[in-house]
Image: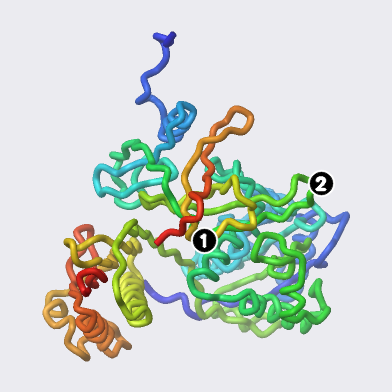
Amino acid sequence: MSSLRGAAAAVGIGLSKFGEVPNFSYLELMAQAVGRALADTGLRKSDIDGVFCVTSPHNVPVIGACEYLGIKPKVVEGTMLGGSSFINFLQWAALALDTGLCEVALITFGSDLCTGGGGLRIPDHPWERVYRPRNPPTSYALATARHMHQYGTTRAQLAEVAVAARAWARLNPAAMMQDPLSIEDVLAARIICDPLSLYDCCLVCDGAGAVILTKAERAKDFPRPPAYLLGVAADGYRVTRMLGYGLPPVIANKVQIQQVVVNLLRNSVEAMAGTTRREITITSSLDGDTAVKIAVSDTGPGLPDEVSSQLFKPFVTTKPDGMGVGLSICRAIIDDHGGRFEAAPNPGGGTIFSFTVPTASKRG
Amino acid sequence: MSDPTAPPAASLGPDAVYREKLAAGEFCIQHCGTCGTNVFYPRQCCPDCGGGELGCVAASGDGIVYSTTVVRRKPERGGDYNVAVIQLAEGPRLMSRVENIDSHAVAIDMKVRARITEDDGAPYVVFDPLDGEEAT
C-alpha cells in the first residue's frame, strides 16, 4: 500500500466561541467553526463533499450535522473515539481524498458539554454501572493508582501534564484558563477521584472546531499556507496477563529481570507492527518443583528458520535499525540466574519467549 | 414448582446465564474449552482464541485488589465510596467495590474475597478484605 504521507493538507481551520457559551447549541457552534474554516479557503459550502464529524451529545452525529449545515456529501464518517475522534478522522479523510472519493473534506466537532449538562457520567455498561464509577475521572484514577503502585510514579510527576497544558493555554488568547498553574496548585486542589485532583481532570467546554482538507496538489492554490498531513495512526494492543497465584519466591536481580521482560515485550510489539492481530500474553507458572517460568508470547509473523538457529548470537537481528544484542544479553542474564531461556513458535502464530528462574528454596 | 413451558437453560445468552447463576447465589466466570483462557465478563466467544466453547465455571471468589480509587462525594449526597479493579485468582479482572473497610484504606495487593449483594433486587458481586493479609 502506498503511503499517505503528505497526500493531503489542511487548507482552512475555524473555531467557534469557546469556553462557557450558554444559549448556543452545539450545531450552532459547529456552523460558526465551519464558516470560519471555509472563509480561510475561499471555497463555498457546496464544495464540501466529504464530512467527518462527531458531536458531544449524539452518537449518530454526521447525518444531523450535514442536514443542519445543508451539505450533501459523497462520503461521511462519524466514528466516536472520544477526544481522539478528529485525529482518527485525519486518516480516513486523507484516504478518501487520495483515492478520489471526495475532493474537499470537512472534519468538525461540536460540543455543549459545559452548559448542556455534560458533567460526569456513570457508564451504561452492565458490568460497571452498579459500582457507580463517575467517568471519565474514575477510570483514569484506577489506571493512575495502578501506575503509581507499579512504577513508583508520583502525583507531582503526573501534575507536570496539567502544568504544561496550562503553560500552552497561556499562549492562546482563546483558552478558557489563563492563570498560571504550579505543581503545588495541582497537588493542593480538591481530590475528585483519588489520586486525581481537580486540575488533573480535563476541562469541559462548549465550542466547535473545523478543519478543511484537500489533496496536496491542490493545497497551494488556497490563500493560506497549507499544513501537510505527514503521519497519523490509530492503534491498539491487547495485553493479557495470566499470572499464577501462590508461586514460590525466587531470588533474582529485580532490575535485570525487568530488563529481560521489557526487552521481550518490546520485541513482541516490534514483531507485530503491521500485522492485523496483535496480542501479547504474559504468563507465569511453576516449572517442575524448582523453578518459576515466565513466558511472553506474541501473534507476530514468527521467527524465520535462519534466524531461529542463531537467535542468541550477538549482532544477528531482523530489525532494520536493531543491533542484535538484546536477546544475547537476556540470555546472559538468565544464565547468570541459573535459569533457562528459550524461544519457541506460538501454536496460533507468532513466537513464545520464556525463561525460568530457580525458586529460593532450590537455591538454598 | 417449575414451569414446564419455561425454555431450557441453553436458550439463555451468556449474560443471562451469568445473572441466573448470580441470583441463585453462585458467582461464575467462563472457561474456554479451546484455549483454556478464563474469561470475565461473560461473552459469546473467547476474546483470546475466538472459540465458542465457553463454559460457565464457579469462581473461587479469591482475588487481589489490582487498583482502587475513592470517588469523592459530599456527605449530604451519600459521602465517599470505593471503586476497585479486582484481579481474580483465575486471572480475569473486573470492576467492583471493596466493602466492610474504610474506602480510603483499600490498598492495591490486598487480598479480598467475593460476596454477592444486591441493589433493588438485582444481585451483583462485591468484595470483602481478608483480614490483615497481603498478596505475596
Q: Residue B27 at x, y = what percent?
A: 43, 36
Using residue A68 as the reference point, say whether residue B69 is left or right of it: left
Q: Read off the chain for label 1.
A: B
Alpha-carbon neighbours of circle 1 within 10 Å: few (<14), some, or many (≥20)? Answer: many
Identify which residue is drawn at 53% across, 37% down: B124
Which element carries disc 2, helix, strand or loop? helix
Density class for disc 2 (Cα within 10 Å; few <14, some 14-19, many ≥20) is few
Q: Position of residue B129 (x, y in %)?
A: 52, 49
Position of A294 compared to A208: left or right? Answer: left
According to the image, label 1 marks what residue? B108
Residue behind mark 2: B76
The residue under the point 51% across, 40% down is: B125
* Along the viewing direction, whichever of A290 and A222 lies nearer the viewer: A290
Which percent across, then down, holds residue A7? 50, 77
Quarter where residue A203 is shown: bottom right
- A76 over B76 or under it: above or below: below
Please tell me which residue lies in front, A281 or B73: B73
Image side of residue A87 versus residue B46, left or right = right
Q: Which element type, helix, strand or loop, lies under badge 1? A: loop
Is the Cβ of the residue at disc 1 closer than 8 Å to that at disc 2?
no
Q: Quadrant of the C terminus of chain A?
A: bottom left
Q: In the rendered structure, which amino acid carries the disc numbered 1?
A: Ile
